[in-house]
Amino acid sequence: MGYLDGLKQSGFATDEDGTQLFYPWGVLGRGYRLADEHAAKNAKRLVTASTWITLTVILSAAVVRPSLAGLLTMVGAIYVVYTIGAKVVTAHLETAQAKITTRDHLQRQAAAYGRTTLTIMIVLSALMAAGILLMAIYGNSHTTWAGAVLWFAAIFFAACSGFCYFLRRLTQSSEK
């Protein structure tokens, strides 16, 4: 599966009865039993729509470069829309007894990404970190702000590479 599929699948699980569970807030909230295919379809539609809306806003913000207040307004709007959608989707669903653990959540996410996607993400993140680091060291970032942003970006992509490596290791440990 691809990157977006991995993001979307990490909020779903199956209990010991074989019933599909939906965790709209991941490890931070309760789960809901998806009693039928219609409920599962609605939950997946909510997660897919919110993922695409979030990515669209992020890419738009990169192009438009809004003020901090504008960016916070966009993030707040996404949160409110997702919260309302989650309330609508889960309104008639039974609460699941099982809580999702961080380890289970990460293992599901790693399995949904697959080793190939994770390997590509490791390599691309490491290349981004190295390229940005070279820009920070040898570039013409004469202002303190620009240099700080470059260093932060390099550290961020290095951390992304490390996290993807961690997820890849989880797929190896679950296969044994």
Image (cartoon, rainbow, N blue to C red):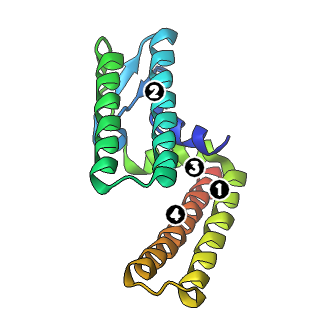
Disc 3 or 2, which lies upstream in sequence?
2
Q: Nearer the viewer, residue 130 or 24?
A: 130
- Which residue position holds label 2? 16
Query: Is tag 4's residue or tag 1's residue first in the polypeptide sequence?
Result: 1
* Residue at x 45% of width, y 40% of height: 54
Q: Callout 1: helix, strand or loop?
A: helix
Which kind of residue does numbered mark 3 sit on? Ala
Depicted 11 relative to depicted 154: above or below: above
Residue sitting nearer the eye, 72 or 162: 72
Of marks 2 and 4, the one in the foreground: 4
Tell me the distance, in whole angstroms, between the alpha carbons under discs 2 and 4. Answer: 29 Å
Q: Are marks 1 and 3 in contact (CB under 8 Å)?
A: yes
Asked if disc 3 and disc 4 are in contact, CB closer than 8 Å, the reply is no
User: Does residue 14 appear anywhere in the picture?
Assistant: no
The residue type indicated by label 4 comes to Phe
Q: What is the C-alpha distance between the residues marked 3 and 2?
A: 21 Å
The residue drawn where x is 37% and y is 32% is: 24
Q: Quadrant of the C terminus?
A: bottom right
Counting from the top left corner in percent of width and height, residue 117 is at 68, 52
Residue type at tag 1: Leu
- Residue at the image position 50 percent from the left and 24 percent from the top: 44
Disc 4 marks which residue? Answer: 163
**SS label for mark 4:** helix
